[in-house]
Image (spheres, rainbow, N blue to C red):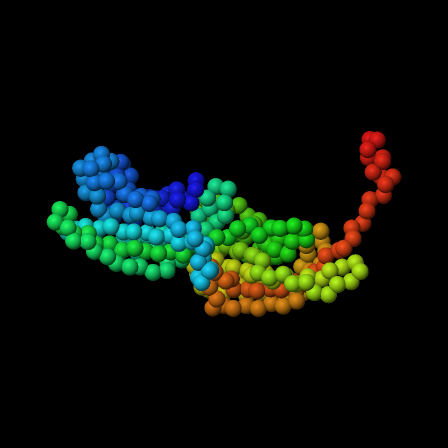
Amino acid sequence: MNLEQLIYKRFSGSQELTGYLASFAGGPAVFSTRSPEADHEGWSGNTQYPQIVYNLDMQANEERKSVGTLVVTLICQNTMEILPEAVEAEVKKCLRDVLLKPEGGSPYAFAWAGTDGYSIDGKENGGIIGSKMRFDMFEYPDQETTDPDPVVAVNRYIKELDLDCLVIGLDRIDDITEISKEVPVVYCRNVTMDKGTETNTVVWMDSGIAVHVLCPDNEIRLKIEAAIANQLSLAGEISMLDQSPVSIKQLQVNYRSDHLKDGQILVTLHYGLLKYRQKKHRIVEIVNTIN
């Protein structure tokens, strides 16, 4: 499924939300981009309201560090008892603390950014009232690069701490993953990379890694953040995939930072890049060729 289909699946799978909505062609009145015309046979002569229309804008917003915006428009009839506020609450529940991962893509999270109400007077329908809800979208792509890879090293170290959490980049992420205190999610990403001193054989690098701990329970989230920070500090170093050492140069924790945008832990790793690789003996290559 693509992202639009996953959003529909999330909305249509909520009994609380669909209980407020009209029916269209045997399903809830949830539409991508635009809703069908009033005379469409899918309405079967029934009411068209309330209904939801959602749109994706994948233009990045650098100010809010989001990769795009999801706009959810709620359309209600002014003569009905169901008000937009009731539907809004259920829409927020559907998009709060959830990761949606389209096929072949990266997981996305959503954060409510604001709501604007509107009304349209009309004689035929008694008037329309509704609201437009805006959600910032955050993407968590796999940060694996090339060996030696500091992000992979941090991912493996956190996983080995046995904190009962999913680590993006190591664990399998379903198309819809609900984040909870039972299933917190950790995401590590590259922030900076600086070249340090250089010798004849080694180039020393400093890599800044941001660690995001996604969990709706504040107490559990703080415990996981503290556990990761404390264990990294006590260890002093971790290992790359080839078992080469990586020292913890700096570590900073900001418990009040936005876990979706910035991450709570910033760790700076110090490691070396070898200029020369040991060459295989030519006789071994000849023997392997003959065999």
Which corner quadrant holds the C terminus? top right
Where residue 235 appears, as percent x and y from the top left, is 66, 64
From this viewpoint, which residue is outermost toward the left? 123
Please report the residue visible at 55 percent of the width from the left and 60 percent of the height from the top: 211
Using residue 30 as the reference point, say whether residue 240 is left or right of it: right
Where residue 150 appears, as percent x and y from the top left, is 64, 56
For the question of whether residue 167 can be seen, the reply is yes
Using residue 208 as the reference point, say whether residue 27 is left or right of it: left
Could you say which quadrant of the image residue 180 lies in? bottom left
Which residue is more in the foreground, 179 or 182? 179
Please report the residue visible at 43 percent of the width from the left and 53 percent of the height from the top: 59
Q: How many marks?
A: 0
Using residue 203 as the reference point, say whether residue 137 is left or right of it: left
From this viewpoint, which residue is outermost toward the right? 283
Which corner quadrant holds the N terminus? top left
Could you say which quadrant of the image residue 203 lies in? bottom right
Query: Looking at the picture, does residue 105 appear above or below residue 130?
Result: above
Where residue 204 appears, as percent x and y from the top left, is 71, 62
From this viewpoint, which residue is outermost toward the top? 291
Please report the residue visible at 15 percent of the width from the left and 47 percent of the height from the top: 125
Which residue is more in the foreground, 156 or 260? 260
For the question of whether residue 215 can be seen, the reply is no
Could you say which quadrant of the image residue 25 lies in? top left
Please report the residue visible at 39 percent of the width from the left and 54 percent of the height from the top: 69
Where residue 60 appears, as percent x and y from the top left, is 45, 55
